Image: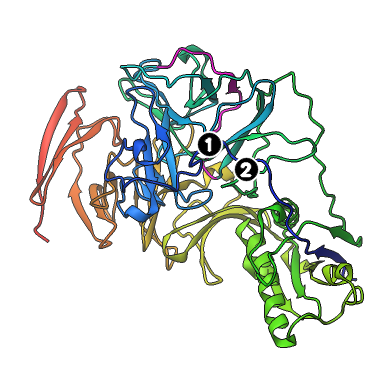
Amino acid sequence: MKKNLLFILLLFALSPLSAQNLVFNGSFEIYQSCPKYQSQIKLAAGWDRPTDGTPDYFNEACGTSVIGVPNNFMGSQKPRTGSCYAGIYLYASDAPDGYREYVTNELKSTLEKGKVYYVKFYIWLGKLSECAVGNIGVLFTEELTKTGNPARLTEKPQLNYSGKVISDSGRWVELLWTYKAKGTEKFMTIGNFDKAEKCNIKYLVALAKDVPLKSYYYIDDVCVEEVEEGQPCRCIQDTNTFIPHAAKMKVTKDSSVKEKPAAVATIKPNKNTLLKNILFETDKADLLPNSCKELDEVAEYLYFNPTTVVDFNGYTDNTGIDHKNIILSKARAKAVADYVSQRGVDTSRIKFKGFGPADPLRNNLSPEGRAQNRRVEYKIHYAPWRHREKIYKKQELKSGYTLIYKKHDSINYLCIRKDFIENEVSEHESDTSMKLDVLGYVYADFDSTVVIATHLEANPIKIEIINKRTGGNMMYGTTPFYMDTVKNIMMFEGSYRRGGKLIVYDFTTGKSELYNAPRETPCFCCFCWKVLSITDSEIKIEYLNMKYEKTEITYQRTPK
């Protein structure tokens, strides 16, 4: 028997928000001019650097691939909100205490003594980071902090996260504290303040002598907001986005502040639930921020119950013209459906319709009755044909493709999906039951191809260049030792038909240049190889021979 789950979402007027985000330009959307290269955080209005470290500013509107959005020198990453974000190095193995990066913001007003504030921001590990850390904090000061070197700031931050390594580069991770102000806090600085020996570090690639490994994190949606009794953190320039598989990060909070646990909606089959905070402006279909929390809970339920599908039905009161109300009700149902889809629920599991003033819950003679009739209903029901499949996580790629890590029966595998057409990644270790971390991750993303990297314990990274349209393997090899995101080329040692090859792959044209790899070398990876120069006419390589001596070799390139 089909099990149904019916929810009724009433549309209420938006209550005014009295609290405000005291961080100016917390989502980095306001800028003086386009960044042209790295280290230009000062172009984001309100932001500065307190040391000689060089934090970066990424802006989608500016179009350059080095500091662009989503593609940049640290991989490919969409902003949490808007079209911009910042990025900082939290740790570097070649200068553990000698080089850190921080970002500073002058708050809109000094924090008031004795008042309690939410302090929140989001971070995401850069995909090309060689290591990850579990150390980041917030320092409040009365004056702007400035030093003449790039070393670690020695001041003790009032708020500090020092715990589980934030190493999953597949989500934005929220860090949230409550803080009781002293009354002198005018400037806010974010970064890693802990000494090197106290840093919790996880190396993501094999550690080799004299090879610097760095940990880089993107930052978005920074917020400082006064706590209002009974109200959740609801920063302006922010939304409570649900990210599937987001870790419940345990953060350090001010022990002097006691908080009531947040209420969590329980979604159960065969039980009607009334959700009261799905909000639209009058005659509009744009969801308002206060709607987010409850819809996030619905999205979470759907995502972690992949055998379910959902129908959204929109309704209005009887005010106005019927055919316009039908259009409006459908647009509102679609807005709810789109929101849930953006939280990781596949669109194939979502349907929506609009019915205008049909099937009112109450009479339309009073304002209260009309308010209850302006609603969106949705019905969750089980689809038994989906029981054999489980999606672990998914990543949006360029050109409308999605890379999906999933399980069917007992087999874990990767596939590439577009327009509901799904291709399993071939020539991959996907025909056996494997742990999820063996399936690999996106190393680089281009229009027609994607580079999948796999790292097994201390072994070198294996990379595969995959054709997005077919899922087919174009070539594979070990760790890339040269990548130019401006020219869109990568160089690595690998296999192609017969024998070891040095491969230069052009992601713009999809063409490769193949050169015979020297045999008198102990390894083929970034620890033994280095590109000295690359021009249109030649490539000059330095590598270690069998005696571990540095040796140079020059390859002449075929003119294009």
Check disc 1: other Cα within 10 Å, few if <14, some if 14-19, many if 20+. Answer: many
Which residue is label 1 attached to? 23
Task: Kindly tell me whether residue 431 is visible in this rendering.
Answer: no
**Segment tinted magenta in the rendering:** 152-170
Which element is circle 1 on?
A: loop
Query: Is residue 113 shown to the viewer in this render?
Result: yes
Q: Is residue 340 above or below residue 182?
A: below
Q: What is the quadrant of the N terminus in the image?
A: bottom right
The quarter holding residue 130 reads top left
Q: Which of 210 and 88 is in front in this view?
A: 88
Residue 167 part of the magenta-drawn span: yes
Q: Residue at x 66, y 40 (%)?
A: 19
Tag 1: residue type? Val
Q: Earlier in the sequence, mark 1 or mark 2?
A: 1
Direction from residue 384 to residue 438 in the image, left or right: left
The amino acid sitting under disc 2 is: Cys
Mark 2 element type: loop
Q: Position of residue 227 (x, y in %)?
A: 71, 33
